[in-house]
């Protein structure tokens, strides 16, 4: 996401846990189902639990870059995971690594 105000749409949901590691900039993660917002900065790891809707917004002045991975799989067998019934509500979890 290179410019202020950019975001990905529509919101995603996956059948596996997703982790972001922010390498540049500041990202705001939004859960449209619960309204939860998490601010992540360079060096932060963000865990997005399985079954949690999420969007990422760039409200900062820097380009946002991050590395992400999903385990065990990205989508369900039924296109993009949207037909999966997740019973529990999830929340973001963040930790930081500011090492060199």
Image (cartoon, rainbow, N blue to C red):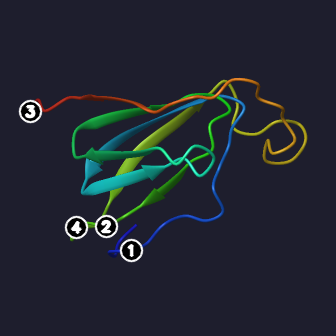
65 relative to 44, above or below: below
Of helix, strand and loop, which one carries label 3? Answer: loop
Distance of label 1 from label 4 (alpha carbons): 11 Å
Q: Is residue 49 left or right of residue 94?
A: right
For marks 1 and 3, the one nearer the N-term is: 1
93 relative to 79, above or below: above
Depth check: give the residue in front, 37 or 28: 37
Q: Which residue sits furthest front? A: 35
Task: Name the quarter where the C terminus is drawn.
Answer: top left
Residue 47 picture quarter? top left
Distance of label 4 from label 3 (alpha carbons): 20 Å
For marks 3 and 2, the one nearer the N-term is: 2
Q: Which residue sits furthest left? A: 100
Depth check: give the residue in front, 30 or 48: 30
For marks 4 and 3, the one nearer the N-term is: 4
Q: Which residue is mark 1?
A: 5
For marks 1 and 2, the one nearer the N-term is: 1
Mark in front: 2 vs 4: 2
**Are circles 2 and 4 on residues that touch, CB within 8 Å?**
no
Q: Position of residue 30 (x, y in %)?
A: 48, 51
Q: Which residue is mark 2?
A: 59
For marks 1 and 4, the one nearer the N-term is: 1
Q: Which residue is mark 3?
A: 100
């Amino acid at each position: 996401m290179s410019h202020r105000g950019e975001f990905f749409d529509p919101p995603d949901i996956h059948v596996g846990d997703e982790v972001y590691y922010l390498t540049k900039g500041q990202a705001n993660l939004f859960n449209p189902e619960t309204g939860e917002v998490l601010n992540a900065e360079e060096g932060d790891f963000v865990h997005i639990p399985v079954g949690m809707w999420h969007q990422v917004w760039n409200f900062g002045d820097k380009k946002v870059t991050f590395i992400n991975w999903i385990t065990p799989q990205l989508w369900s067998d039924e296109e993009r995971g949207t037909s999966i019934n997740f019973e529990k509500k999830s929340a973001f979890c963040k930790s930081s690594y500011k090492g060199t």
